Amino acid sequence: MGRNFNEIKKQLSEEIKQRQIELESEKEKFIEITGSFCTHWIVDYTRREATHDKPEITERLGAKLKDFKNEVQILAERAPELIKKEFVKKEYWKHYETSDQISKDQQSNYFNSDYNKYKFTGNRQPEILDNGIRMVIGQLGIILEKYNYSNPEKNSLDRWEKEGIPYYRYGFDWSQKMKEASEIYAEKLKEFQELKRKLKEIIKEEKQFKAQKSWDSLN
């Protein structure tokens, strides 16, 4: 008796759908955690810049210091909204890809597989997500330049942009919660892609079985 292909395909499809729901949930968790992180990062970075690294500029601002703090606070409060606006883009999340093809790299090369794009390599953050965060916190550079805390014309290290887009180019650490959220997404994505691979294989096997049956019936 042959395999019940319809039952196997149904079961795999249901598992794939469940993984999609879980991946969407993990995506939303990462966005929420990261928005909060960026709010605190912007405030903490500015406080350190104004009180520790460049107190002489703070002193020269005088009455404009209040305006500076207000602009920074507005950006900090908008950070969760900006993060959400950036990370709703499907380009950041591999579970939205519609192709059911699993490349040879995904099958045989651990470091090139999609799910590993969301995992840390030593202390190095996943670039696929890190770039979006840097674009959001990079908007602080516009305010710092406006109030003379940075001067890109005189010092290239003050240039908070990449290809004309606000971008924080220097080192910073993700929070532990961000790291955990990205790692969980990676593991669920691995399971999701494995299920899609199995479904592709069972569909191929079913076609082979039907072809063999048709061939044999002509004997």
Image (spheres, helix red, strand yellow):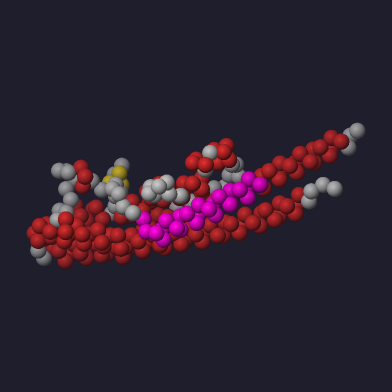
Q: Is residue 40 visible?
A: yes
- Residue 40, image x, y percentages: 30, 63
Residue 46, horizontal then vertical, whole percent: 22, 59
Instruction: Answer yes or no: is residue 147 visible.
Output: no
Q: Residue at x 15, y 43 (%)?
A: 154
Residue drawn 76% across the image and 49% down it:
5
- Within the image, what quadrant is residue 34 found in? bottom left
Q: Residue at x 36, y 53 (%)?
A: 133
In the displayed image of the protein, which residue is found farthest to the front? 122
| Number of disc labels | 0
Magenta stretch holds residue 195: yes
From this viewpoint, which residue is outermost toward the top? Answer: 219
Question: Where are the magenta residues, as a range?
Answer: 174-198
Position of 186 relative to 58 (above/below) = above
Image spot of residue 33 (x, y percent): 40, 62
In the displayed structure image, the side of residue 206 where residue 182 appears, left or right: left
Which corner quadrant holds the C terminus? Answer: top right
Drawn side of residue 111 relative to residue 14, left or right: left
Judge whether 127 appears above or below 36 on screen.
above
Position of 23 with respect to 145 (left or right) is: right
Residue 109, position in %: x, y?
53, 39
What type of secondary structure mainly makes up the magenta span? helix
Residue, x 58% and y 57% (percent of image)?
A: 19
Is residue 206 in the magenta section? no
